[in-house]
Amino acid sequence: MIEQTIPIVSEQLPARLHPWHRYVAMGDSFTEGIGDPEPASPGGHRGWADRLAEELSRGHEDFAYANLAIRGRLLQQILAEQLEPALALKPELISISAGGNDLIRPGSDPDALAESLDGAVERMTAAGATVLLFNGPDIRDTPVLGLVRGRVAIFNENLRTIAARHEAIIADMWSLRQLTDPQMWAGDRLHFSPLGHHTITLMALEALNVPHTLQAQFPKPLAVRNWRTARSEDLVWAREFFVPWVLRRVRHQSSGDGVSAKRPTAGPIFGPGMPPGAAE
């Protein structure tokens, strides 16, 4: 069982817990919520951003939320496709997680990526928004992704510089040691599981200094696997997830081709289309 260090607050929360009335999320599959399926949610996925918006909306009857993230998007695509629509929604809080799909590609330059992101964050803060920046998790023990750990670390340090320069807030996934547990990851080993998204939501609320009603969840102990079982699972994963991912790269295709933002306009997080009991 992994130790949870994020404090838990009482479910009896006062109104007006934070100053934001309008939140816009920008990014790729991570922010879209891939790995956290929920058929009743827009787009069929929930994810940490939806979970965060749910908590932020409590005590704010006029709270509105938009999620412009689309799976497979590279940093420049996110900035080109999502920045102007995000600013047009006049958000008071913007989250952006971008660059992960770039970093796993051969030859990517974390310094150049950060330079592009810096200008975008400057525009967000100049518009009066609080900016929440997500850095990358420590993927040391993660198959395939672990190969680019060094690039992720460099990018993360650049993000700290950007945050300091523009008074943005860092959602520090690198320091979230709970994410090293395999059960925090979905079956594709590229995205987070519902447990992972829940844990990241807790961390983001802590970074924003927002009291909340969420409670920590812990992974159940895994059964001991022998070598043969583990290798068999690796082969299944390679056939179902890794090979299709490689083929998309070769064919210059994206998992986000033909996909549109699940919440392109700002509106209440609770309401028609939400999971049953979500507003409780």
Image: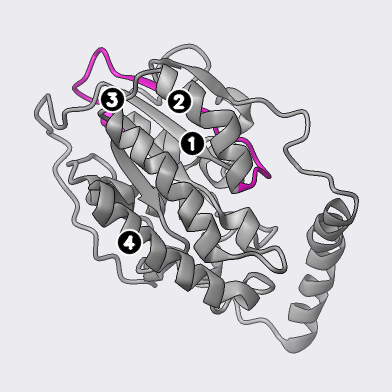
Q: Position of residue 11 (x, y in %)?
A: 17, 37
Q: Disc 3 to disc 1, how far (Cα)? A: 18 Å
Q: Nearer the viewer, residue 129 or 248?
A: 129
Which residue matches tag 2?
A: 86
Which residue matches tag 1?
A: 26
What residue lies at 40% left-to-right and 63% top-to-bottom? 158
What residue lies at 19% left-to-right and 41% top-to-bottom? 210
Colour scheme of the rendered structure: one colour
| Residue type marked 4 | Arg
2 or 1: tag closer to the N-terminus: 1
| Residue type marked 1 | Met
Where disc 1 sits, the SS reads strand
| Residue type marked 3 | Ser
4 or 3: tag closer to the N-terminus: 3
Which residue matches tag 4?
A: 160
Q: Are marks 2 and 1 in contact (CB under 8 Å)?
A: yes
| Residue type marked 2 | Ala
